[in-house]
Image: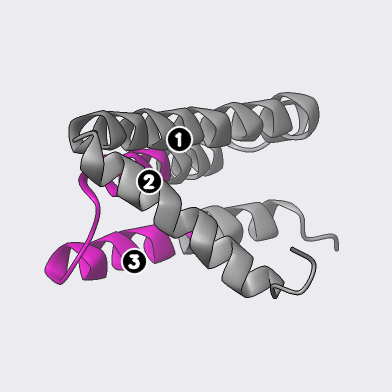
């Protein structure tokens, strides 16, 4: 067994899993599991972002002017909606273009607002 290269061994394991799925007709179960993993990953990203905000950003952001807070939180909220759309729908073609344009605009607005509020002098 040690004479088989790791790449070939990995491909053999993947082929065996694919064969089991095909023979036992488990495509529906696999699709359901993939959707559940997508949702779980989205929730994990959202939870990590919330914990980061709670520990570091909340106290600082409350000192900003109301307009800067509104722009920053709106950019973050739109970005979360955009990511949710990406995780649920999957993207290709024009949808992918819109996703990246909206994500870029959100990141730009949030970063610029943060940068303006953290300038010293």
At a point 42% along the width and 47% down the height, the residue shown is 17
Q: Is residue 76 above or below residue 10?
A: above
Percent position of residue 81, x then y? 33, 39
Please rate how many residues cluster around mark 1, counting C-alpha atoms within 10 Å: few if below 14, some from 14 to 19, many from 20.
Answer: some
Dot 3: what SS?
Answer: helix
Quadrant where the image shows the C terminus: bottom right
Dot 1: what SS?
Answer: helix
In the drawing, does residue 39 fall left or right of residue 51?
A: left
Residue 21, by quadrant, is top left
Q: Which residue is label 3 attached to?
A: 100
Dot 2: what SS?
Answer: helix
Q: Main secondary structure of the magenta part?
A: helix
Q: Residue 88 in magenta?
A: yes
Front residue (pair 34, 38): 34
Looking at the image, tell me whether mark 2 or mark 3 is earlier in sequence order: 2
Q: Are marks 2 and 1 in contact (CB under 8 Å)?
A: yes
At a point 42% along the width and 33% down the height, the residue shown is 37
Q: Which residue is label 1 attached to?
A: 42
Q: Is residue 86 above or below residue 81?
A: below
Calculate the distance from the C-alpha at mark 1 to the C-alpha at mark 3.
Answer: 17 Å
At a point 66% along the width and 37% down the height, the residue shown is 64
Mark 1, mark 3: which one is toward the viewer?
1
Q: Bounds of the magenta span?
A: 78-107
Please rate how many residues cluster around mark 2, counting C-alpha atoms within 10 Å: few if below 14, some from 14 to 19, many from 20.
Answer: some
In the drawing, does residue 2 fall left or right of residue 85?
A: right
Q: Which residue is label 2 attached to?
A: 83
Residue 98, by quadrant, is bottom left
Percent position of residue 18, x then y? 35, 51
Quadrant where the image shows the N terminus: bottom right
Front residue (pair 61, 24): 24
Looking at the image, tell me whether mark 1 or mark 3 is earlier in sequence order: 1
């Amino acid at each position: 067994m040690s004479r088989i290269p790791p790449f070939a061994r990995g491909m053999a394991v993947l082929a065996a899993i694919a064969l089991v799925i095909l023979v036992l007709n488990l495509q529906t179960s696999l699709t359901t599991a993939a959707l559940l993993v997508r949702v779980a990953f989205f929730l994990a990203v959202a939870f990590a972002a919330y914990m980061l905000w709670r520990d570091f950003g909340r106290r600082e952001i409350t000192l900003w002017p109301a307009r800067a807070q509104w722009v920053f939180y709106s950019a973050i909220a739109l970005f979360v909606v955009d990511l949710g759309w990406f995780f649920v729908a999957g993207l290709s073609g024009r949808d992918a273009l819109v996703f990246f344009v909206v994500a870029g605009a959100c990141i730009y607005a949030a970063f610029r607002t943060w940068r303006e509020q953290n300038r010293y002098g």
